[in-house]
Amino acid sequence: MANRHLQRSVAMQSLFEWDFQGRHDDQSMIILDRNIEEFAPGIDEVVFAKHLIEGTLRERKTIDALIEKCAPEWPLEQVTVVDRNILRLGIYELMFGNYDEVPPKVAINEAIELAKSFGSDSSPRFVNGVLGTIYREMGEPLKDDISENHDHFKKRKEEKQADAPLEEAAAEELSLEPAVVKPAKKAPAKHTKKSV
């Protein structure tokens, strides 16, 4: 969902600015509104971005304590401002988010993508390590869950079902059979004699 990804990106940039400018919570929504105008003009719905900022700031003490616990060799103030706020956002979604909207693994992957886009070369590994540790400590919720309880799986299933009749009709029209892909066989080694 590109709209959610864009809102998450703008939320992270807003947290970065909020952190860089002295962490004045009363300025967070002003910063977000300005960044939405600059980085996401024309976006219709910004509720998700506002929810991320408000929730992350509300849970900041718990989140910051987790960062320090899971990255003990990196005091919080020594973690780069970008990485620190990607982690804050990722931990908020991982621990306090709605799993029906954003499952844990999606929250981790989105944070890693933000680290690739905005962080240094080592940021994705660092973010993955911290969030992975927290995820394991949480007992890996929804690790193997692909049940129909989650909207994204329902939507994917519905899309496949909707496309199936169209694909079958097109195959019948062209009288094509579905292709079966088999693994390639390894060619036998050729033995040749070298002539002198």
Image (spheres, rainbow, N blue to C red):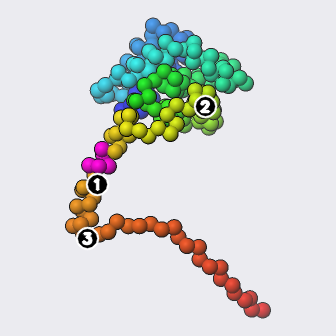
Label 3 sits on what residue type? Ser
- Give the numbered dot on residue 79: none
Q: Residues within 10 Å of mark 3 (few under 14, many from 20)?
A: few
Badge 2 marks a residue whose secondary structure is helix
Badge 3 marks a residue whose secondary structure is loop
Residue at 39% of width from left, 29% of height from top?
A: 101
Residue wearing tag 1: 164
Q: How crowded is mark 2: few (under 14 residues within 10 Å), some or many (20 or more)?
A: few
Does the magenta segment cover residue 3?
A: no
Which of the two discs, 2 and 1, labels the residue nearer the N terminus?
Answer: 2
Q: Do the residues labelled 2 and 1 touch (CB within 8 Å)?
A: no
Badge 1 marks a residue whose secondary structure is helix
Where's residue 103, x and y in %? Answer: 46, 32
User: Is 80 located above or below residue 61 in the figure?
Assistant: below
Q: Residues within 10 Å of mark 1 (few under 14, many from 20)?
A: few
Residue wearing tag 3: 175
Q: Quadrant of residue 119?
A: top right
Label 1 sits on what residue type? Ala
Q: Distance between the residues labelled 3 and 2?
A: 50 Å
Which of the two discs, 3 and 1, labels the residue nearer the N terminus?
Answer: 1
Where's residue 86, x and y in %? Answer: 54, 26
Does the magenta segment cover residue 160?
A: yes
The residue segment tinted magenta is: 158-162
Residue wearing tag 2: 136
Residue at 60% of width from left, 17% of height from top?
A: 64
| Count of number-bearing discs | 3
Q: Distance between the residues labelled 2 and 1?
A: 37 Å
Where's residue 175, x and y in %? Answer: 25, 70
User: Is 12 located above or below residue 173 in the figure?
Assistant: above
The one of 37 and 178 positioned closer to us in this rendering: 178
Label 2 sits on what residue type? Arg
Where's residue 114, x and y in %? Answer: 51, 33
